[in-house]
Amino acid sequence: HDVLDAPCYYRNPYKRKHCRNTQSGSSKTFYSLQFRLRCRFPDDALYCAYSQPYTHTELQRFLCARARSTPDLPRYCLAQTLATSLNGNACPLLTITTLDADPADAGATGPPVPVRARPVVVVSARVHPGETCASWMMEGVLSLLLDPEDPHARRL
């Protein structure tokens, strides 16, 4: 097996420019994590990742699984293609709101507000290919927002 050797977490000499300790007034410092990875065999290749990968295929599986498990999803989620990547993959754009005119769905009183007149919140993730953490975060956000049983999601 490969070995993680001599892990060390320490305060380094670099100072945070815009962050001060409220008690002493001194600049706060950054911290570093240092370790060695040793391979068992001299010609082994070892790959390290900042985060668990999140592929375009995983995104498609997540969206398809959500659509299959939530039959009334089209009532509050409109899926469109925002753009196509250089690799030819569709970049999805999801509009999540009550799309039909039933004010009870949103817990509102009075006449429904037209979609174009509603407040808008834009949540974007994975702008660059290496931002896999953002994809995991977006999956969590979408899981909440697309959950028909969650009272917070229904209110939003």
Image (cartoon, rainbow, N blue to C red):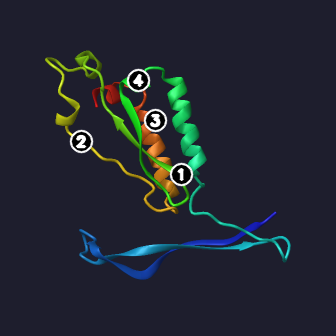
Q: Residue at x 48, y 23 (%)?
A: 70
Q: Which residue is mark 4?
A: 148
Q: Residue at x 52, y 56 (%)?
A: 132
Q: Which residue is mark 1?
A: 89
Q: Position of residue 65 (x, y in %)?
A: 56, 31
As drawn, 101 above or below 63: above
Q: Residue at x 18, y 22 (%)?
A: 112
Q: Which residue is mark 3?
A: 143
Disc 2, disc 3: CB below 8 Å?
no
For label 2, the SS is loop
Extreme-bottom residue of the structure: 13
The quadrant where residue 115 appears? top left
Callout 1 amino acid = Asn
Extreme-left residue of the structure: 110
- The one nearer the camera, 10 or 76, is 76
Is the N terminus in the top left, top right, bottom left or bottom right quadrant? bottom right
The answer to whether residue 133 is left or right of residue 150 is right
* Inter-mark Cα distance, 2 to 1: 26 Å
Label 1 crowd bin: few (<14), some (14–19), many (20+), radius 10 Å: few
Callout 3 amino acid = Ser
* Inter-mark Cα distance, 4 to 3: 10 Å
The tag earlier along the polypeptide, 2 or 4, is: 2
Is the C terminus in the top left, top right, bottom left or bottom right quadrant? top left
Identify the mark at residue 120; answer none if there is no mark: 2
Label 4 crowd bin: few (<14), some (14–19), many (20+), radius 10 Å: some
Tag nearer the camera, 3 or 1: 1
As drawn, 94 above or below 77: below
* Inter-mark Cα distance, 2 to 4: 20 Å
The tag earlier along the polypeptide, 4 or 3, is: 3
Label 3 crowd bin: few (<14), some (14–19), many (20+), radius 10 Å: some
